[in-house]
Amino acid sequence: MIPKIVHYCWLSKDPFPDDINACLLTWKKHLPDYEFKLWDFSNFDIESSVWVKEAYLLQKYAFAADYIRFYALYNEGGIYLDCDVEVVKPFDDLLHLPYFIGRENTPYGIEAATIGFEKGHPLLLDLLNYYKDRKFVTDKSQLDILPLPAIMLECINRKYILEEIPSIKKFNIDIQVISILPIDYFSPKTWDTKELNITANTYSIHHFAGSWKKKKSLSKRMAIWRHRFLGLFMQKYRI
């Protein structure tokens, strides 16, 4: 059972911009009986993760938040939302599930901006272990900027069977299977053209605000993502 807690993370000392505030208002509108928990360094120990510390010191806040979301969900359970996510309707009919994850509207995407988990779910532990002792600044003095959806895909493929399902009714409770909901559930907006395709299934919209990156940087990350995904696909199917 997923508790009615919405976790979110804001590590910048800057105030929320207007577009983020607009998204946060939709949370309160559609989730009036949910608890909202903001994660920052008043309730997360920056010294507990070298990844988080290095990313924060370089002002790469989104990468620091990548780890913090899994920490929050593993220890408390609930729903994690990126601040640029607009909520369209309550998540109540998903809360009986052990987790929920959807596809992102990218070539090989998992939507990491809207995810829900019960406390202590084993996939969350696998994701935390991925970051254990991992440095954001590599030994070659480069930044480890692999997108979070690709990291999630990598961790899932190591231990689980990834199964795309057409609806909640087809959710697979097998602990060896990770069920992924369709794009329209949590990511009906394309990251590049911003085309929007909301359906009756849509719970949230990721607006890809990306205030921490430039468009050129995003394109570069997508290229890295595609390359890594192709490698995982070939490895899995022995191509």
Image: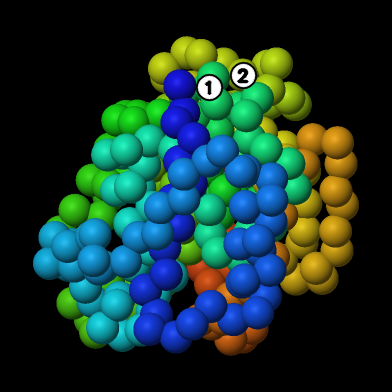
Which image quarter is the N terminus in? top left
Q: Amino acid at mark 2?
A: Phe
- Residues at marks 1 and 2, CA–CA distance in whole angstroms: 8 Å
Q: Is the C-beta separation of discs 1 and 2 under 8 Å?
A: yes
Left or right of 21? Residue 173 is left
The residue located at (51%, 68%) in the rendering is 224
The residue located at (63%, 35%) in the rendering is 91
Which residue is disc 1 drawn over?
A: 97
Q: Where residue 134 sits: x, y (%)?
A: 21, 61
Q: Is residue 82 visible?
A: yes
Most foreground residue, 155 or 97: 97
Nearer the N terminus, badge 1 or badge 2? Answer: 1
Q: Which mark is residue 209?
A: none
Q: Where residue 156 sits: x, y (%)?
A: 43, 37
Q: Where residue 120 sits: x, y (%)?
A: 30, 30
Q: Nearer the viewer, mark 1 or mark 2?
A: 1
Q: Quadrant of residue 142?
A: bottom left
Which residue is disc 2 drawn over?
A: 171
- Provide the secondary structure element on which disc 1 rests: loop
Q: Is residue 218 visible?
A: no
